[in-house]
Image (cartoon, rainbow, N blue to C red):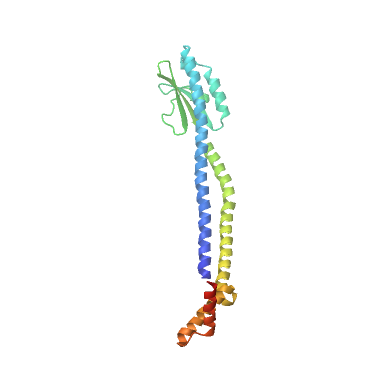
Amino acid sequence: MTRTALWLIGVFALIAAACVAFGAYFSTVTLVNAHRSAVESRFAMTAERLAGVVERAAALGIAPPAQATLAALLASEARIEPALRSIDLVDEHGVVLFSSDPARVGTAAEPASPHAVRRTALNDFDEPIARVVMRYDPQVLDAGGAALRADLWRVAWPSLIGAAAATLAVGLLLAVALRRAARRAADPSRWPSAARAALADVDLAHAFLDGGHDAPAGLKDAVARREGGR
């Protein structure tokens, strides 16, 4: 029985530790995805604002290729975000008109880079006239996610060890209490007085049935006491 109890306590401790570990893992995934989504949302807001600047200038009759002040604006916005590689203004043919990285001006933009946020600028007829492309470095986002994972596991490991230790401690205390209760139950001298009296009545009844004679005086007295108690 003791070996079985210890085995069960160990299993429950492992289950408690596994629950904490799974909780930490899913929390890590959720936080990393939320971090990436928050950064990309911030990029999307910046791209939306820049596309609005292009649209307002176009409404005043300034075509995107003639909006020379955009170069300084794109460079200023790119300096705010260290994760950005460049902010490009691309025309409808896919050629970079202006960029925070001057070396990219006049080159062809990547058609479908997975690490970029895009917003299209429209004219008054809702026709696309240019596209703002914010290219970011995925390694910077990964570094932020790794920092989040490290911080979370720094908290999770003590919690995991504490959950396992607490389960072991509680299990051992319960096992000791159950063992003491079993010992008391096996020793009639440690029973309550009512239980001992009931056991004595049972012994007398067994003696009467085994002997086949008249009921012993003790049994008669016990029955009389019971009848009187009613």
Quarter residue 126 falls in: top left
Quarter residue 225 falls in: bottom right
Q: Nearer the viewer, residue 177 or 132?
A: 177
Kindly identify the residue that appears in the image at 45 percent across and 25 percent down: 119
Image coordinates for residue 2, horizontal then vertical, percent: 53, 70
Look at the picture and state if 154 lies above or below 133.
below
Q: Is residue 98 visible?
A: no
Q: Nearer the viewer, residue 109 or 157?
A: 157
Q: Nearer the viewer, residue 214 or 10?
A: 214
Q: Is residue 78 visible?
A: yes
Image coordinates for residue 21, horizontal then vertical, percent: 52, 51
Quarter residue 194 falls in: bottom right
Residue most extreme to the top: 61
Q: How many marks?
A: 0
Kindly identify the residue that appears in the image at 53 percent across and 41 percent down: 145
Look at the picture and state if 56 lies above or below 2.
above
Kindly identify the residue that appears in the image at 50 percent across and 79 percent down: 202
Kindly identify the residue that appears in the image at 51 percent across and 60 percent down: 12
Image coordinates for residue 224, horizontal then vertical, percent: 53, 78
